Image (cartoon, rainbow, N blue to C red):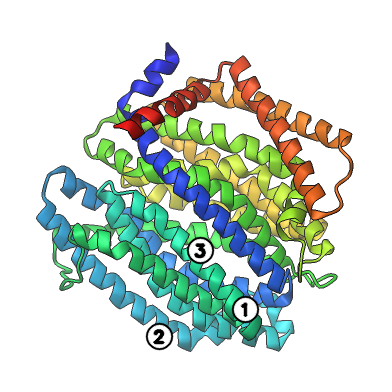
Amino acid sequence: MTHATSTDSPPTARLARAASLMAAATVASRVLGLVREIVTAWLFGATNAKAAYVIAYYVPFFVQRLLLGGTLSIVFIPTISRYLAQRDEREARRVSGSLFSLVFGIGVLMVVAGQLLAPLIIPVAAPGFTAIPAQVDLAAGLTRIIFVAMLFLALSVFATGFLQAHQQFTVPALAPLVFNVVIIAGTLILGPAYGIQGLAISWILGTAAQFLVQMPAARRLGLRFMRIDLRHPAVRDIGRLAVPAMLGLAVVEINAYVGRLFASLLPPTSGVNAVAVLDYAYEVIQAPVGIFAISVATAIFPLLSRHAAAQATADLRATTSLGLRATLFAILPVAAVAIVLREPLIRLLFERGQFSAEATQAVSSAVAAYAIGLPAIAGYYVITRAFYALHDMATPVRIGVVMIGLNAALDYLLMLILGATGIALATAIVSTVNAGALLWVLRGRLQNLEGRRLARTAGRLTGATLLAAASMWGTGQFLVAASGLLDTAVWLAVSAAVGGAVYLAACRLFRVEELGVVRDLLRRRPAARAR
């Protein structure tokens, strides 16, 4: 009876439809994203060149997220959703067109500034690079190229937010597929001829394609470049909200970047650069986060915004709790796979071409360390969407500022002991503390957060995950040690399949209600397709 009630509730039904649609496309996108990383690893390994590219990418990405894409997507969707809920589509188009033009104008200025300031940015972003002047020059040149890609990325993020505010999820979910296909093709063509610069140029092509593929749908809904109206009340409200949102994103991005800064201080060993190691490891961890957590968080954000606007606290609380429980159900077994099967996983994904066995050892160790914090990393996306729906940008900022200091201290201390793995472990610890603090505050804001239900689900899922991890480890002990690529694939597949079966059986034994929600959703899909 509990299953039926949970599945039939309006928040669950809407979440299931949107999340299942997005998850299918997101799975394909993340698979292509891993293929993109596999191609990059094959051509460039975990070398100094790849490390220069990592720094060169994240500096423009930080600026873009801060000024444009990330900030506007947080404050733009609730504002447009409010107009659409009021059936005022004319004003929604006016505000969207004005902001669209503003994003383009700021983006052009960002690109120009990036061309001028790149040589000054790199020594600050990666102080360890200054020991090798050629490394600084390479990273600065790559930074100039990628700043251009960030203009298209900002426009793409805006188009995605516009479509999602209109409850259009299909095109935004498919656009990253185009993005990844173009980058993969571009890297294979340009990489051998132009080296790491070919990878950077491919990002321009990929982000441009991601933007352009969304524009027909956005234009049908009324998105146009319009005169920038800074006096419009909605634009002024967004400008007011953008400042704390910008600060919040700055905290998040600085926290993400602190590890790379410290990693640049670690000297390469056996041709393996710590900056590149952490980048590969984090990409592996982010794949399931993108498939599950971001899909759920993105799907529920417009719904959370509407509940908050209507002051429907009970619905807001129920939707947030559902998002967290669904995320935990999906992400905990993935964390077990990343920890128990880390080495064969990385060997299967990356160990070929320029990616050495030493790089496999380093990356697999970092993956296991990151995976400890995977539930918190995934849950963070759902928790913060609840705050953003409430137009509370300040709380994540205040807590995040404290996390920057904790992150830097742990990075430094654990780096001295464990090298790059220590930095990954520090990230996992800080992510857990951060998510816990935010959850505690949100619980107070929502006058409870179905705490007992959430704790009961978390406890049962943890027990199921531990049984799955033990079964994967035990299965590996009975199998012949993997050597070749095919052997590794079979070893990994059998171990993961056993772990998955044990996890689902344990969930059934422990009466985890989310298992019933997923089962009922799968049963309903054929009927939905028939309609």
Q: Quadrant of the C terminus?
A: top left
Q: Is residue 200 left or right of residue 305?
A: right
**Camera-nearest label, 3 or 2:** 3
**Camera-nearest label, 2 or 1:** 1
Mark 2 belongs to which amino acid? Val
- Residue 151 is drawn in which quadrant? bottom left
Residue 506: x %, y % from top left: 65, 21
- Mark 2 is surrounded, within 10 Å at the Cα level, by few (under 14), some (14 to 19) or many (20 or more) other residues, namely few
Nearer-the-camera pick, 288 or 79: 288
Q: Is residue 316 left or right of residue 423?
A: left
- Residue bearing mark 2: 112
Dot 3 falls on a residue whose secondary structure is helix
Total count of labels: 3
- Mark 1 is surrounded, within 10 Å at the Cα level, by few (under 14), some (14 to 19) or many (20 or more) other residues, namely many
* Residue contact between numbered discs 2 and 1, judged by CB atoms under 8 Å: no
Quote the CA–CA distance across marks 3 and 1.
15 Å
Specify the label residue 191 is tagged with: 1
Nearer-the-camera pick, 7 or 54: 7
Q: Is residue 346 left or right of residue 168?
A: right
| Residue at 23%, 47% in the rendered image | 81
Quote the CA–CA distance across marks 2 and 1.
26 Å
Residue 90: x %, y % from top left: 10, 56
- Residue bearing mark 3: 180
Residue 259: x %, y % from top left: 65, 61
174 relative to 139, above or below: above
39 relative to 234, above or below: below
Residue 340: x %, y % from top left: 76, 40
- Mark 3 is surrounded, within 10 Å at the Cα level, by few (under 14), some (14 to 19) or many (20 or more) other residues, namely many
Dot 1 falls on a residue whose secondary structure is helix
